[in-house]
Each structure stands twice: as C-alpha cells, then as structure tokens.
Image: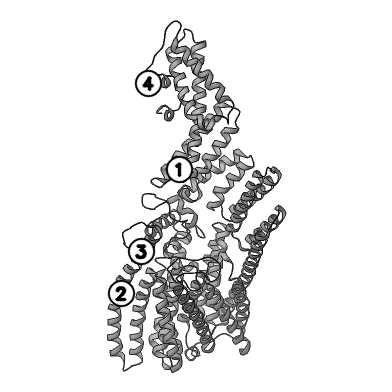
Amino acid sequence: MNKLSNLALGLCAVFFAIIAATGIDLITSRIGVGLAGLGVTLCVISILRVLNPPQSSRSWLTIFSLLGAGYLVGRALMGGPEGLAVHDVTLVLSAIGVYLSVSSTGKGARSLWIMLLAIVGIANVGLAISQSALENSFYFWQSGGADEGHAIGLFAHYNAFASFLNGTVFFFLSYVFFGRNVAARWACALLSLGLIVCLVMSQSRGGWLSFVVGGSLWMILLILFLKQRRSKFLGIVSIAVVALGIGGIVSSVWMVQRITENRVEKYEEATGRKVEAKVSDGGRVAFQQMGFEIFLDSPIVGGGARAFSYRALEKWDPDTLELWMGDPEFAHNEFVQLLSDYGLVGFALILILLFIHGIVGVINLVNEDDRDSGLSIWQLGAAGGLVAMLCQSYFSFIFHFPACVVLCAFQLAILASRSEEKSKRRPVFRFTELVIGIGGLGVAAALVFLGVSFFKGYVLSKEAVGQLTAAESADEVFIGLETLEEAGDRSWDPKSFEIVARRAMSEANEAVQRKDPAIAQKFNLRAKAAFERALELNPNFSAALAGLPRVEDALGNHVAAEEGHQKAMKLIWAREIKLRPYFHAARSSFLQALKSDNDASALNLLREAKSRILKRREILEPRRELDEEKEIRGIIQAWLNYYEGRAIFQRGNDIWINAKPRNPELALALLLEAQTRYQLSEKLVKGKDPRWEKEAKQLKFSVETLEAGQYQPVKLSEEQIRNAIEQEAVLDSDSTSR
C-alpha cells in the first residue's frame, strides 16, 4: 500500500511540474496531459486516503477548502458563458487537485515535489538568460515573440513569469539557511540568485515590488524561526534583515523608475516619438473601477465566470480610459476580479481560506521542533512566496495562469501540513476522510475529462493548421475548417471559431473575385455557423458580435444584419478601433442603399451610413482615420449628395411646372442647390449610376431656362437659396448646413 501511495504521489508531482512548466493560459490547451495525469493519480490517492489516512493531514481544513472550491465551480457553471465558465472551473479543479495531493504527502514525497519545482526553476532561469542574450523574448511553446525586452522564461507574459519566480524563490532561500545538506544548500543559493536575476530581467514593476513585500514577511518569519530555535545568529540576522528591508524599499523606487525609463527608451526607438518617462498604471485603476461597478450590479454572488471580460465594455469611460487599449479580459486585480465574478460570497470564502492557512502555517512555523525541520523550511518558503504572489495579484491577473494557480495551491497545502510526529498524537476520523476521498474522486474524474478534451483539442488544432496551410482547393480548406471547429468544441474556445469564420470570409471574398458565387455562398454559410457557435460559447464575444452581421450582409440577410449591427454598436462600441462595429454598420447601410430600387429608402440608408461614420469619428477622436475609412466616408458622402440632389431636383421641377401660381424663385433656388450636389458627386457617381449624366444635363438646361426667364429673369443670393431649401424641408437638418 505504501509503495503504491508513494508511486501515485510521485506521478502526481510529475504532472504538477508539467502544468507548472507550461506557463500559459488554458485556452491554448497544452496542459491537457498534465490535467489528465493529475486526475488519474488523484483518483488513486483519494482511494488510498480512505483506506490509509495520511498522518500529516488536516482533514477539517481540507474539507473547508473543498467547500470553497465547490462554490466557485457551482457559481461558474450556473452563471456566465459556457466557454468562460469551463476555463474558470478548470483552474479551480487544478488548484484543488494539487492541494488534495500535497495534503496527502509525507516528508519523502514532499521533497520530490520541491525537487521538481527546482528543475522547473532551473529551466526558467536558463531560458530567460537565453532570451536576454538574444534580445528577444521568444515564447518557447509557440512561434512568435512576446514583449520585447522582457525575459519571460517558459511563460507567455513577463508578469506571470515574475509571479512564478516570486512564488518559488523563497523555498530555496529558506533551504539556504536551514538545509542540512551542504551541497544542496550551495545549489539552492545559486538557484535563488538565478531566480532573482531573472526577476530583474523580466522588468516587471509589480513583480519586483511584490518580491520586496514577500521578502519582508519572509525575513520577519525567519527571525521568529531563529528565535524559536535559539540560534546564536539571531542578532546578526536581525541586523541584516533591517538593512535588507531598507535596501528593498530604496531599490523598489529605483527599479520601478529604471524599468519605466527602459520601456520609454524602447518605445522612442521604435516610433521615433519623444514621450515623458513617468510611472503609469497602464489603465489598471480604470479597469479596477469598472470591475467594482460590475460587482455592485450583483454584489452577493457576482456576475459569473469572467463576467468582467464582457461586462467591462458596458462601463467603459473614454474620458479616463483610452480606446486603443486591448480587450479588457481581466481586471488586472485578482481581488476585484473575484468580487465582480463571484461576489461577496466567493470573496469571503477565499479570504477566509487564505487567512486560516496563513495562521496555521505561522503557528506551525513558530511551534515546530527540530524533529521535522524540513517541513518548517518549506512552510517558511511557502509563506514568503504566497504573500509575494498575493501582492502581485493586486496589479495583474496571475491566478488566471494555471502554473501560478497550482503553485499557490501547493503553497497553501504546505502551510496546512503538519509533521508526522505531531499528527500521531491526534485521532483521524474516518468519516471526514471518506468525505475528502469522495470529493477527490469527483475532482479527479473532472480533471481527467477536461484534460483529455483539452489535449485532444490541442492535437486537432495543430492538425487543422497543417491542413489549412497545405490546402490547395476549396474542399481541402473545408476539411481544415471542420477540424478546427472540432478542436474548438473540445476546448470550449470561441476564439477557434473566430479563426474558422475569418478564414471562411477570406475564402468567400476570393471566390467573389473569381466570380464563383456558389463557393462564396458555401464559405459564407460556414463563417456564419462558426460565429454563431462562438456566440453560444460566449454570447458577448466581441469578435463574433462584430463579424456575424458582416456575414449576414454577404448572404443577403440584411434584416438580420441590421439587428446584429445594432447589437454590436451597443455592446462593443469601445472596441471601435479594433473591431469597427460602426464602420461595418455604415458600410452595410451604404451597400444596401446602392441595391435599393426606392430613392426614398436609399436616401434614408445613406443618411444612416453617414450618421454612423460621424459617430465613429466622434468615438475615435482625436485618433487618425485609416485610408480605408477616409475612402468610404468620401464615397458615402458622394452618393448622399447625388440622392439628395435628385430629391431637390424633383421638388424644384415640380414647383416650376405644376405649382399654381408658379414660383420661379423657389424653383431656381432648389435647382441651383441640386446642381451643386450633382457636381459634388460627379467624380464618384458618374458612370456608376446611368441616371447621373442624363439628369445633370437636364438640370443644367432647367437652370439656364429659369435664369433667362422669358417673362421674368430670376437671380438669387446664397441666403435666399438656403432659406428656400429650409422652407421646403427637403433635407435633414444636418444636410441643410452644407
């Protein structure tokens, strides 16, 4: 039994290392094998826990942790989009799976976990040094680079990398002071130095500040630990702690300013623009304010899994937050994120869990004797690392990275552990172990299911990329798109369906150029289905909200397209720069106007197109328009001039020919204005509408006839013309100002 238990715990540690080493968000689906493996070994551990309860377990704390995780999982599944809920659930299950495994770990297995963590740390140090040497923060797990100038190790972002370093380094610093093996202490000293150097190379301001905060607590606990052991080095260490604390504060100010200056220098080199080197929050304060407003809308249980990612656009204030900023998927503050997504209930549960584990860990640390000093070493490291990570979570969304989540769970489990010698003094209740075992089996089953699905999704996505790259015919492209759709279903990822839709739209456009409407129709239908599936997974997915009405227009479903445009303009107006909902809605109205057989309907559609373009310019102010946007604005205005000119022309003729008595002054005023409109539209409309040239000649003749006047010549001032147009109310209020 013990051999089987040790084997299971060892395998579990390996899968923990796989997840920790991946360093990426779940959406990329690369950690599926780690999740599945963790689930299988957790299943064995849960069964063994019931049959042979671990001596180092704190069952009551484990049950409370299961209850907290249960609330988060339940709230995620019962509220919020499916595609977002699954990823939150996976994060929670990963954390509780590691926690349950470590809580069943004895001294020997615990050392294995730490050793694997050291291996992951060494890998990160080596990769980070390579990235700095090559001056390229390439991302190890996929092609393409990350933020230039930042060391990122195995991670996709330097802040997540810094958080992992903070959560790891204090374990090895603690062993440097209290480890029994001299060679291992020197190795830990070198590794600790490497991790700190990498932290500097990451250029994460929040990461360095968090290191100082976590290090300060770690040094205070270090003094308490030395005092408890009656160490003769207590005085020296105390003086060193004070000196290092002061140095940490001073270095923080210098580091933050220096990192900011480096970023400004790189920006100036890339753009050639001079900017002031000042510390900025990067929009974090505004994000946090929006998150708090979302929390106030549903304060008890929150808005559901990742509610911030789609509710934030409702709260966007362009006066305090620039529109060029990326999609606000996270609040950049895990405490605010927790409030907005899971409400006061979720926030209170997590806060209580953290507090209890912290108290238990400190009590263990202070009261621990020499019989199990190894546990005390790791608890000292866990306390410092946990505080550092929690501090950084105030500036970033680090706990939405699986590597950081499982590391945090590992720290909590270490803090909750107690030595085998002490645990023998207390009885173990079989009922509580049964409850924990059943809970563990449930978590294990879910992890296996999700892990297999994620990994299959990853494999299929790679297969789809290969198929689409090699595709030479429409049928081959369809096969690749179908494979990618299956990958998206496996990972509950709306972004996969966005890729499908965009590729299908591109193929449809090429088919239109080739004058192959059947193939264009087929690809457009595929794009529509992909966008609709993306919205099933996340009804507020911005890219799909903006893209679906464009496909509906291409399919001729203009009523559905208009409904989609209206929804997109309402929900994602703050993403105008990136997704351009107003631009595409304006273009849609314009294209419909050109297809209309009714002049009045066409005129209304063109006016709608113009109002949307004007709204877009208002939203984007003071940013510069793209050439494409300037072009469409000019085209819309030209056609609007033409259709308004036709309406004025028709009214002027009617007054001249049919009015009794005739009003040649009013008729001439309208015809002169119509003539101006025809001239303004000539460049873009002449030759595209066969009526233009004929009507322009007729209009010229009518003006000349009225001006000559057989009975009474007519001459009007610009003011008289303007008054006449306003009198007739032929145009809308905006048009008369022209």
Residue at point 40%, 59% (across, down)? 288
Name the amino acid type tagged 4. Answer: Glu
Using the image as rendered, state which of residue 436 and residue 381 is in the foreground: 381
Q: Name the residue beneath numbered marker 2.
A: 251
Expressed as whole percent of the image width and height from the top left, the position of residue 420 reads 50, 89
Using the image as rendered, state which of residue 561 and residue 506 is in the foreground: 506
Q: Looking at this view, name the residue that lies furthest to the right.
A: 475
Residues under labels 4 and 3: Cα distance? 56 Å
Question: Depth-wise, is mark 3 or mark 1 nearer the camera?
Answer: 3
State the mark number for residue 718. 4
Q: Name the residue beneath numbered marker 3.
A: 265
Task: Determine whether label 4 and label 1 are within 8 Å by CB.
Answer: no
State left or right for residue 438 relative to residue 279. right
The quadrant holding residue 83 is bottom right
Task: Determine whether label 4 and label 3 are within 8 Å by CB.
Answer: no
Using the image as rendered, state which of residue 248 and residue 221 is in the foreground: 248
